[in-house]
């Protein structure tokens, strides 16, 4: 079997584990939706795509290690997986679809691959334990409410990003600083009012200031130490060189 068809296991509430053969390349739309007892899925290296709402509402699934062979994940594919705590996205992925992890309230960390160019609307909305997100260089657009209601404390928007959608980071009550490139368009209050928005130049200045402080601390540590005596140099006749 190469494909898992759409609606194949929809609502199989007693299904708790799935192991695919290495021939499977596609998981169809809503294939495992509402399999509420499903706790373990072993994704094969042959897998290429995961369909719309494929694992929607699989609230017992605690993790997802997606192989690098996957290049497409449909909208809402993992929405409302309340038990999931971490996710590894495949390196071939170039976009994160709308609402793909929305409502995954236990998700604490998401590693976004370097090849991702767009982050869809509500992609991580209401992931209320999500504190750690690194946006790779190359991201051009962040959709509206993409990170709404997360626990992110600071964020650096890549210089390649040209647009951040409406309310993209709103509802992030702990977000205190956002570094944003000057060329980026900010539509309809993407950040909470309490968040300090800094340019990337100010970010670089901060880094330079911190580096200078560290160097100053190093200088303080060597104050009072006697400089080492330079080695004695001799000329070809054995006398002291001048």
Image (cartoon, rainbow, N blue to C red):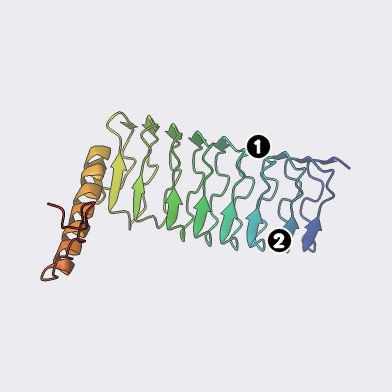
> How far across and down, in percent of the image, does residue 242 sit?
12, 51
Mark 2: give few (<14), some (14-19) or many (20+) Cα within 10 Å. many
Mark 1: give few (<14), some (14-19) or many (20+) Cα within 10 Å. some
Depth order, front residue of 4/158: 158
Q: Quadrant of residue 132?
A: bottom left
Task: Say whether residue 152 is left or right of residue 226.
Answer: right
Depth order, front residue of 205/17: 205
Q: Quadrant of the N terminus?
A: top right
Please name the residue shown 25% across and 43% down the image: 204
Depth order, front residue of 187/161: 161
Which dot marks residue 93?
A: none
Depth order, front residue of 140/164: 140
Q: CA distance from mark 1 to mark 2?
A: 24 Å
> How far across and down, in percent of the image, does residue 22 sit?
83, 47
- Residue hosting label 2: 36
Q: Quadrant of residue 141?
A: top left
> How far across and down, in percent of the image, does residue 145 sit?
43, 43
Residue that extends furthest to the front in the rendered view of this protein: 237
Please name the residue shown 21% across and 54% down the image: 237
Above or below: residue 54 compared with residue 214: above
Please name the residue shown 79% across and 44% down the image: 7
> How far across and down, in percent of the image, does residue 26 sit?
77, 40
Above or below: residue 86 compared with residue 90: below
Secondary element at image label 1 = strand
Instruction: Return the disc, 1 or 2, that comes first in the chain's sequence.
Output: 2
Please name the residue shown 35% across and 48% down the image: 155
Task: Say whether residue 8 is left or right of residue 115.
Answer: right
Which dot marks residue 72?
A: 1
């Amino acid at each position: 079997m190469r494909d898992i068809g759409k609606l194949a296991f929809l609502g199989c509430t007693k299904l708790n584990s799935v192991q695919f053969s290495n021939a499977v390349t596609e998981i169809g739309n809503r294939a495992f939706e509402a399999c509420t007892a499903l706790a373990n899925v072993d994704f094969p290296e042959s897998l290429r795509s995961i369909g719309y709402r494929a694992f929607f509402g699989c609230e017992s699934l605690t993790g997802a290690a997606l192989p690098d062979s996957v290049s497409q994940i449909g909208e809402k594919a993992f929405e409302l997986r309340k038990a999931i705590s971490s996710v590894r996205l495949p390196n071939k992925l170039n976009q994160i679809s709308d609402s793909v992890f929305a409502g995954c309230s236990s998700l604490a960390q998401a590693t976004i691959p370097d090849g991702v160019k767009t982050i869809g609307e509500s992609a991580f909305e209401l992931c209320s334990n999500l504190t750690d997100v690194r946006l790779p260089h190359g991201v051009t657009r962040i959709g509206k409410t993409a990170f709404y209601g997360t626990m992110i404390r600071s964020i650096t928007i890549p210089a390649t990003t040209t647009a951040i959608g409406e309310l993209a980071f709103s509802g992030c009550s702990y977000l205190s600083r956002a570094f944003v490139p000057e060329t980026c368009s900010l539509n309809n209050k993407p950040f909470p009012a309490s968040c300090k928005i800094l340019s990337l130049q100010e970010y670089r200045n901060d880094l330079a200031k911190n580096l200078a402080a560290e160097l100053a601390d190093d200088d303080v540590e060597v104050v009072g130490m006697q400089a080492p005596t330079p080695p004695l140099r001799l000329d070809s006749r054995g006398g002291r060189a001048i």
